[in-house]
């Protein structure tokens, strides 16, 4: 039985180390897909994003969707790491790693997981502009909802 790795943390993560961890000692994995979401500068106007979450609830939801991916695709490993706190442009925000015997399952499940994270994961983003001021909370985007609806 595959046990997903779920972490919500403030510190940066190591993408290569997470990919090595998921395949360590395994010869049945033929494909790994690793997606890393980064904080954008929004054309130089963004100083940072501040990500908030409800501890416990966020991990529980990520675990639930990871198990849904495991039920839908023949996966050999799933890792979801989501950061919280203040994140500067260029820094990592989220990592999804999926592993399978074949590439299609790894690609599709990673895409599914990211669509979920963009639309339903219990995280809230507040923008901190370069020029100061109050910033604002990032609103949901209809195109993200449309992408998630295909699943």
Image (cartoon, grey):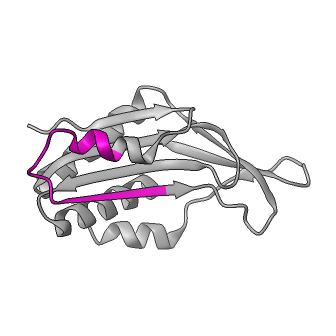
Does 76 sit left or right of 22 as displayed? left
Task: Locate residue 72: give its quadrant.
Answer: bottom left
Does 69 sit left or right of 17 as displayed? left
> Is residue 32 covered in magenta?
yes
Q: Is residue 121 visible?
A: no
Task: Locate residue 139: give its quadrant.
Answer: bottom right
- Tell me the residue at 22%/61% (across/down): 106
Expressed as whole percent of the image width and height from the top left, the position of residue 30 reads: 15, 60
- Tell me the residue at 33%/64% (across/down): 111
In which quadrant is the N terminus drawn?
top left
In the rendered image, the vertical position of residue 24 relative to residue 96, given as above or below = above
Expressed as whole percent of the image width and height from the top left, the position of residue 86 reads: 68, 39
Q: Is residue 26 visible?
A: yes
In which quadrant is the C terminus drawn?
bottom left
Q: Nearer the viewer, residue 56 or 92?
A: 92
Does 89 sit left or right of 63 as displayed? right
In the rendered image, the vertical position of residue 126 relative to residue 56, given as above or below = below
In the rendered image, the vertical position of residue 63 relative to residue 149, given as above or below = above
Q: Which residues are magenta?
A: 19-36
Expressed as whole percent of the image width and height from the top left, the position of residue 71 reads: 12, 51
Task: Locate residue 81: give its quadrant.
Answer: top left
């Amino acid at each position: 039985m595959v046990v997903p790795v779920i972490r919500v943390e403030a510190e940066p993560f190591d993408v290569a180390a997470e990919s090595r961890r998921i395949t360590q000692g395994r010869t049945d994995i033929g494909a790994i897909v690793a997606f890393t979401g980064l904080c954008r500068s929004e054309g130089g106007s963004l100083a940072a994003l501040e990500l908030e979450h409800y501890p416990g609830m966020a991990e529980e939801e990520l675990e639930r969707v990871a198990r849904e991916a495991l039920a839908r695709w023949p996966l050999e490993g799933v890792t979801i790491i989501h950061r919280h706190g203040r994140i500067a442009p260029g820094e990592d925000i989220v990592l999804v790693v999926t592993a399978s015997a074949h590439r299609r399952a790894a690609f599709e499940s990673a895409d599914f997981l990211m669509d979920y994270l963009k639309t339903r994961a219990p995280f809230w983003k507040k923008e901190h502009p370069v020029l100061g001021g109050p910033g604002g909370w990032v609103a949901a985007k209809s195109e993200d909802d449309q992408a998630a609806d295909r699943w």
